[in-house]
Image (cartoon, helix red, strand yellow):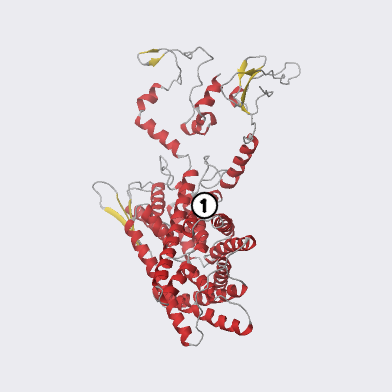
Amino acid sequence: MNTRPGPVNQPRHNTHNCTNNETNTPPPAQTAPIATPLAHTVVSVVACDHKTFLTPPIPISEGNDLPMDFVSGFSQAFRRVAGSRAPGTTAGGSNPVATIDAVKAAPAPSPLKPIDFTNADEINAVLDLAARIGDVLLASGMSNGDVKAHMHAITETYGIHDVHVDITLNTLMLYTTMGPTEGALSAFRVVSKLSMDFARLEEIDVLVRRILTGGFTRAEAADELHEIVTAPPTYNSTFVLIMWGIFTGSVAFMIGGHLPEAVISCLSAIVIMWGSAVLAGHGLPLFFQNVFGGLVAPVPAALAYHVGQHYGIEVNPSVCIGAGIVAMLAGLTLVQALQDGITGAPVTASARFFEAALSTGAIIAGVAFGLNIASRLGIPLPGFEGSASTNVVQNVVITVSGALAGAFFAVACFARLRSTVITTVTTLIGAAIYYMILIPIGFGTIAASGMAATLIGLFGGLLSRRYMIPPLITAVSGITPLLPGFALYRGMYSLLNDRPSIGFSSMATAFAIATSLAAGVVLGEWIARRLRRPRIATAYRGVRNIVRRPLAVKARTNGSRVNGPRTNGQRTNGQRANGRGAPRTPNTGSIRARWRNRSYRNTKARSQWRRR
């Protein structure tokens, strides 16, 4: 049997004063192998001038087994990138807890910033603060369950625990009472419109995190919220329009286009977004804004196709129209609708699904009008042209284009640098897995979309928690370039040209892809939430156990949790039953201190090794 001198990971409990009295240096360890049932381990006996004790088994990799250095190195690298579940502060520290996880953890035993509970105005002000924050979160696309968790966490921070929160589509209501004989207090708010402002969402995330750590009083939090809501946009409108154009051009590269198609798609998207903003400023409903966008998309593509034929430039108008449809689908609430349906808000989910379907129908109607207008102008479009097969180099270009599309979409939604970088990495991972692994090995489009979206939600959720940004940003931005604009246009074109079987099949495929993307990203984010859920709830669980079992705690106040013989149910012997060693160290620390101690959280096997 192979032996190794000395333990590599010696426990902290075996820190004996084993030194040489003359040189004050530790003596050389004497090791000897001991038979053990573990196949690839060695147990060393370390001798010093005080006592001989056992060290934990040292794994030895043989054959094709992974070396322990590689496993530990990979684990450390993963924790460095994605963070860990170790406790930390919600406002800083080495392992900060993300806001989305902190609001779902157990509340603190006592409020951090209590208010005057006899003053109805103070209670109303807290309810209004929570409602206004929930307004911004809901308008940014967050699901009902997460918005409720944020609102509950805010009210509990200020000491109001018994609050009922109801969210139905775009209305928020909070209800509480001051006492059994007092009147009810409530706050009601209506979300005006969906606003994809990622910069504001980040600022609200920071605000909620500071509220949960007691950094703001109620008045200070209200002032900070007012500054966030009334602040000017992060980027000016011209820059945002350019970002929308570059995003659409990147999508054109993704679906098989080249430089001419990308330029045409870019210019068309700028016109569509500018016109939609002007129409929205005049109060035109979103349905007609989508009709306008669908109307504009085919005309530049048809014009460029005929001009290219005249000058010998090949242009695929189907790619241009498909990229424009993706740009218009980007603002829909399909992910939010599916997440609401999964997390127990079916009424809101049904309304959002209907809203997304209605907007998609408006886009299809607009594209149909645009095709008819192009025919009337004498520039009819050719038959539908699908994308050609790709090789490895083209797949690399498509993958990079997908990452850039996710980044430019995030910037178009006012994301800041850190969120943009994380979104780019997440989208690059999803696009690489989709175009370079899943599709080449034979997965269907629907299955590949769902699997890629799941990984986008997983890695995006982990990286978002590691770098303290809302996971919604990476989720929405990551799947947007994969939206089925090309399949939607193919189905619509087939229906308009008397091919209903192909048309309905393509439309059903487009709907299945969109649903698969939304379901996959929700599943991936759920997995990330379980992997990085903070363990701080364990401490609160210990507090609840103490409150529920006061007699057991009182019986253990002397700190002699030992295994000696019992008399009348109490342990009288301060020695262990097996006679080894001294009695255990009394548990004199607080629950949080014991919980943070590594030995308190180690497994039973490691504890047995330490006792020896």
Residue 196 visible (yes or no): yes
* Residue furthest out toward the left: 181
Where in the figure is residue 127, as x and y percent of width and height? Answer: 36, 55
Total marks in image:
1
In this view, the residue in front, 350 or 112, is 350
Residue plotted at (48% across, 25% down): 587
Where in the figure is residue 494, as x and y percent of width and height? Answer: 43, 73
Q: In the shown orientation, is residue 545 left or right of residue 470? A: left
Quarter holding the C terminus is top right
In this view, the residue in front, 66 or 503, is 503
Tag 1: Cα neighbours inside 10 Å, few (<14), some, or many (≥20)?
many
Compared with residue 8, is residue 511 higher up or lower down, i.e. above or below?
A: below
Residue 140 visible (yes or no): no
What residue is shown with label 1?
Answer: 455
Q: In the shown orientation, is residue 212 left or right of residue 306? A: left
In this view, the residue in front, 221 or 472, is 472
Compared with residue 216, is residue 14 higher up or lower down, i.e. above or below?
A: above
Q: Secondary structure at mark 1?
A: helix
Where in the figure is residue 332, as x and y percent of width and height? Answer: 43, 65
Quarter holding the N terminus is top right
Residue plotted at (60% across, 61% down): 395
* Residue furthest out toward the right: 23
Where in the figure is residue 477, as x and y percent of width and height? Answer: 51, 60
Identified by mark 1, the residue type is Leu
